[in-house]
Image: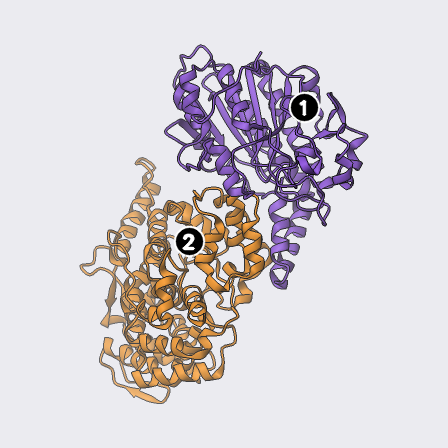
Chain colours: A purple, B orange
């Protein structure tokens, strides 16, 4: 492992404590034949709007419901075939698609239907029909296959919990919060003049001192994804790694915000692939979010909490270049509760199928991971 | 409804935040719930006392001198830094763990009132022993006992140079040694009467002479810690604030301190500071008067004075007038989230980064008790940074809104509740609550 490189790379105002660096490399030898087959699990927290990401340009009702959101991007979409187009910010992901290394799955959801971020995330991460905070689907997969996991996080997310051999790593003193937290704080202080003023002054000073704050933030997910690539390249590296990215809760100003989010996601994914080098062809990347958003644009040029969203499967190991899943349609009668994209398949079915094929898991093993539903026969892994 | 509001005020304005389930108990009778917390704070044993710290320092100093001369042996370990962080952190651990917190707030107040700085080879390990030995055990008794214990404590005697003060007419006095007025001046200005308390330069000099000889043990002396040295004590009668004190050795200074402790100016000054610390930067005259009167009636019984403050209507004004200090913010966050307690060094470093280093006021006046001293832009951002980091470390198995409701009760605004419940993740919801006006103010 190029530990030096990692330290240098994170030198952009981040320092890595040697202690925490040692943790991920303390893995024993994995005798598994498939030990080089990596899984990268990317959790998008906040509810990614799939209709603005994997856009059903063919659906005549799209413009009826959300012209204000679709119009600014519709002419720049990258065609995925079947009438779908990929948001223009997703450059790397589109290259992958053309190389048959990326496959979006449309209209998927976990069994959860109540539209709360927290519960939705817990559901998806548990991978069960009820929330279990002590057991996550990836944790169970690691346990079943005796593999190692690593979450790029301060504490172990629900996804990897459950007696799995999983640890966490995060660059220490990662000082800068995401843009989103600051903008939330401005809203929070709407009637507290003192705190709002101080926050503004502080951020201005910081911006002057450190160059544009947003420039700093932009590096945030990208830096973590890059680190993830480095961490996975090592001989004793973990088999599965989890990344988290917040900022998807686009209740307002969605065109701009989602564009920025997707850009950061795409840059991060680009750096991940670049760092992985030859390991890329053995890698499965799963990008998921807790739920989708309302089909109609709301009064603040955004969307509210919805139900179905899209899942992105990617990586050199993936049989990509196709849009998977069944399209439910956007007529008002076809929407879930008259407002959300209708889920046509369970997100766990796709994750389970891909995991089983990628790690060559027995039916019994995969049944430990997702006990509530059988995996499918669709070939998702090359 | 009023009781609910008062329970929240009790927990946050006077305490360090309710522990889970505490608010329900407090609602029954918030005032009584608070008064029941007037118990002595329990500091863990197993730390060296000030006498042992002095001895260890002398041993270290001797070794260092030998090391410098001989250049042969190994450089001796300096344990001062380690002792300092362990003792400084111990107080925070106690405040986080205890179900009571008003008593820890009082300890914090008096520890700052009698501020000593943990800077320099000797003061570093000595500073944290002052609150442990002189303040905590005397927290709820008469101010006089606390005052005498503090002024005779090695940390204070070393910090304000009285340990080397020598009576000018004693045989020990000479061109290198003489009277040091430093401690006497601060006793009058900061610890008792206050700067406008009606004393003059002569009073300072007379007090300095009365407490000359109040010193600390030297290396290899049979006593450890505080030592009264008759040989360096200025003989003779002293006159302070017009009152005559016969020379009775160590008792002379003690007699003056006892009178200072019950002096009307002291009663008013310390009452005002208490009210300013807990309630508002400019407390009402009526409140300070009530506390001063209790001070007079009880001869400076701290528990009674604090009780008067709590029983006064001003204590329960609905709008928080103060921001939490970084230390209060830090401790109340740990109490609320149940985060694993950080190790001592990390804990002290965090407080340093938040701008509230333990024993780090750097002056005998202590940290400011005014809210405006703590509301800087950078201070706020430092809290955001820290909260952003730790909110990801909390294992949140309940919605953050529940946490916020349990902690702020009916004082939680609809707006904050909405923001917290709509956050994109539990972690962000927690971060928003910890940075909310409801949590930052008290």
Q: Residues within 10 Å of mark 1 (few under 14, many from 20)?
A: many
Instruction: Please give left or right for residue A268 compared with residue B150 in the image.
Output: right
Inspect this view and state whether residue A231 appears: no
Q: CA distance from mark 2 to mark 1?
A: 42 Å
Total count of labels = 2
**Label 2 SS:** helix
Q: Residues within 10 Å of mark 2 (few under 14, many from 20)?
A: some
Query: What's the mark number on residue A224?
Result: none
Q: As displayed, is residue B36 above or below residue A12?
A: below
* Front in this rendered view, residue A101 or B17: A101
Q: As displayed, is residue A187 above or below residue A222?
A: below
* Front in this rendered view, residue A307 or B135: A307
Inspect this view and state whether residue A292 appears: yes
Q: Give coordinates of residue A177: x percent, y percent.
A: 58, 44
Name the residue carrying label 2.
B336
Name the residue carrying label 1.
A93
Instruction: Please give left or right for residue B285 compared with residue A205 in the image.
Output: left
Q: Give coordinates of residue B58: x percent, y percent.
A: 28, 52
Q: Residue at x 34, y 47 (%)?
A: B82
Q: Residue at x 41, y 19 (%)?
A: A365
Q: Give coordinates of residue B195: x percent, y percent.
A: 46, 78
Q: Residue furthest left?
A: B222
Res. B240 image quadrant: bottom left
Res. A334 image quadrant: top right
Chain bearing tag 1 is A
């Amino acid at each position: 492992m190029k530990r030096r490189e990692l330290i240098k790379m994170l030198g952009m105002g981040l320092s890595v404590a040697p202690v925490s660096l040692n943790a991920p490399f303390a893995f024993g030898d994995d005798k598994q034949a498939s030990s080089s087959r990596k899984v990268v699990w990317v959790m998008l927290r906040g509810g990614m709007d799939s209709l603005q990401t994997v856009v059903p340009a063919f659906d005549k009702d799209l413009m009826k419901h959300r012209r204000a959101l679709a119009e600014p991007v519709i002419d720049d979409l990258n065609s995925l075939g079947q009438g779908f187009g990929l948001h223009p910010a997703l450059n790397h992901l589109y290259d992958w698609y053309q190389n048959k290394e990326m496959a979006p799955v449309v209209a998927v959801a976990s069994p959860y239907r109540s539209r709360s971020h927290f519960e939705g995330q817990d559901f998806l991460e548990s991978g069960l029909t009820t929330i279990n905070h002590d057991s996550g689907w990836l944790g169970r997969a690691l346990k079943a296959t005796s593999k190692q996991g690593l979450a790029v996080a301060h504490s172990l997310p629900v996804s990897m919990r459950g007696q799995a051999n999983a640890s966490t790593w995060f660059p220490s003193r990662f000082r800068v919060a995401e843009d989103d937290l600051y903008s939330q704080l401005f809203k929070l202080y709407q009637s507290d003049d003192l705190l709002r003023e101080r926050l503004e002054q502080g951020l201005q000073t910081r911006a002057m001192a450190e160059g544009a704050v947003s420039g700093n933030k932009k590096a945030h997910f990208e830096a973590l994804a890059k680190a993830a690539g480095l961490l996975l390249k090592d001989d004793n590296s973990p088999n599965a790694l989890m990344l988290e990215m917040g900022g998807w809760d686009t209740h307002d100003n969605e065109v701009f915000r989602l564009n920025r989010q997707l850009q950061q996601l795409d840059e991060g994914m680009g750096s991940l692939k670049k760092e992985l080098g030859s390991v890329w062809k053995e890698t499965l990347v799963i990008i998921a979010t807790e739920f989708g958003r309302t089909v109609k644009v709301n009064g603040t040029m955004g969307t509210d909490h919805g139900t179905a969203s899209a899942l992105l499967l990617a990586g050199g190991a993936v049989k990509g270049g196709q849009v998977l899943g069944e399209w439910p349609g956007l007529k008002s009668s076809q929407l879930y509760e008259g407002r959300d994209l209708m889920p046509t398949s369970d997100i766990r079915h796709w994750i389970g199928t891909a995991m089983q094929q990628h790690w060559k898991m027995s039916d019994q093993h995969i049944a430990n991971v997702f006990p509530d539903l059988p995996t499918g026969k669709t070939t998702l892994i090359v | 409804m009023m009781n609910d509001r008062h329970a929240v005020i009790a927990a946050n304005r006077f305490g360090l935040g309710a522990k889970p389930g505490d608010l329900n108990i407090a609602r029954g009778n918030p005032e009584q719930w608070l008064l029941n917390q007037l118990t002595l704070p329990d500091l863990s044993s197993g730390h060296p006392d000030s006498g042992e710290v002095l001895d260890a320092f002398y041993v270290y100093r001797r070794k260092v001198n030998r090391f410098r001369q001989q250049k042969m042996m190994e450089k001796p370990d300096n344990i001062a830094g380690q002792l300092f962080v362990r003792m400084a952190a111990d107080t925070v651990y106690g405040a986080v763990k205890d179900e009571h917190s008003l008593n820890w707030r009082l300890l914090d107040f008096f520890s700052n009132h009698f501020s000593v700085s943990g800077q320099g080879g000797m003061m570093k390990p000595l500073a944290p022993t002052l609150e442990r030995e002189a303040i905590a055990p005397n927290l709820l008794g008469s101010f006089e006992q606390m005052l005498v214990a503090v002024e005779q404590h090695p940390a204070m005697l070393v910090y304000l140079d009285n340990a080397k003060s020598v009576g000018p007419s004693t045989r020990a006095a000479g061109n290198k040694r003489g009277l040091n007025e430093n401690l006497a001046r601060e006793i009058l200005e900061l610890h008792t009467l206050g700067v406008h308390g009606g004393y003059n330069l002569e009073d300072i000099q007379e007090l300095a002479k009365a407490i000359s000889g109040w010193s600390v043990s030297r290396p290899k002396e049979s006593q450890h810690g505080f030592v009264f040295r008759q040989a360096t004590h200025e003989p003779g009668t002293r006159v302070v604030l017009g009152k005559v004190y016969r020379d009775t050795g160590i008792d002379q200074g003690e007699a003056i301190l006892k009178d200072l402790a019950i002096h009307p100016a002291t009663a008013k000054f310390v009452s005002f500071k208490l009210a300013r610390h807990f309630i508002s930067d400019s407390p009402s005259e009526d409140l300070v008067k009530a506390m001063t009167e209790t001070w007079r009636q009880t001869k400076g019984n701290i528990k009674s004075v604090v009780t008067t403050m709590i029983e006064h209507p001003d204590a329960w004004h609905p709008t928080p007038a103060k921001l939490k200090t970084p230390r209060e913010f830090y401790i109340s966050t740990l109490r609320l989230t149940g985060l694993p307690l950080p190790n001592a060094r990390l804990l002290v470093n965090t407080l340093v980064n938040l701008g509230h280093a333990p024993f780090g006021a750097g002056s005998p006046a202590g940290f400011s008790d005014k809210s405006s001293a703590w509301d800087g832009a950078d201070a706020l951002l430092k809290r955001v940074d820290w909260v952003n980091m730790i909110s990801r470390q909390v294992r949140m198995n309940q919605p953050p809104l529940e946490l916020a409701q349990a902690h702020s009760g009916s004082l939680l605004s609809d707006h904050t509740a909405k923001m917290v419940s709509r956050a994109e993740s539990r972690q962000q919801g927690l971060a928003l609550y910890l940075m909310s006006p409801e949590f930052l103010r008290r």
